[in-house]
Amino acid sequence: MSFRLRSRPDAFSLIEIVLAIGIISFALVGIIGLFPVALNTANASQQETHAALIARTIFNDLSSRPGDRTVLLQQPSLEDAPSTIDVDLATEAEYFLAFDRDGRALPDKITAAIFESGTSGTANFLVKVAVTLPEPTATGPPPVEGVSRVDVTITSPAAAPLENRPPLSFVSLLRQK
């Protein structure tokens, strides 16, 4: 009895299979190489979104409070009393705040030195709110009386020194009450 191998014309040869696996492997290496880039981009996008929400919250707090002085509200502390910072939009000053990774205000007392050097703890964002009064210029229109410029600079991560935290800046003109 003799055995005879039959070749099927519709089957793949071993060389074709090895070439196909090689091409797929080459493509997968490129795709897997993009994952760290995509993760870094997603993280940066999330940080920028939280920063924009923090800035919007600050501008809303400053513009919605009636009276001559306004208040920046922070989350309740352990004593369940909200921590507040009095802000006078008619006076030039700087104020410092801390926010957690979800964009919620923290009751931490932040100073200019802490903002410069960074802080440990639950803070992820450090924020500087600078109130300035517009000054007249020789070439531009005269400043509007009763309006202050508010610059909000948000940096992250809070544990790093300032030179290692890229700032995100937001500016608004707010009416003094």
Image: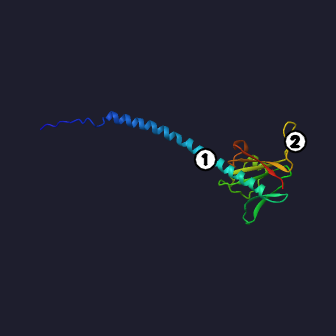
**In the rendered view, does 77 fall on the left or right side of 135?**
left
**In the rendered view, does 116 fall on the left or right side of 141?**
left
Q: Amino acid at mark 2?
A: Pro
Residue 40 lies, in percent from the top left, at 59, 44
Residues marked 1 and 2 touching at CB (< 8 Å):
no
Quarter of the image with the N terminus in it: top left
Q: Quadrant of residue 25?
A: top left
Residue 88 lies, in percent from the top left, at 84, 54
**In the rendered view, does 140 fall on the left or right side of 127?**
right
Q: Element type at marker 2?
A: loop
Q: Which residue is mark 2?
A: 136
Q: Which mark is residue 43?
A: 1
Residue that sits furthest to the left in the current view: 1
**In the rendered view, does 97 fall on the left or right side of 40?**
right
Q: Amino acid at mark 1?
A: Asn
Q: Quadrant of residue 75?
A: bottom right
176 in relation to 16, above or below:
below
Spatial CA span between label 1 and label 2: 41 Å
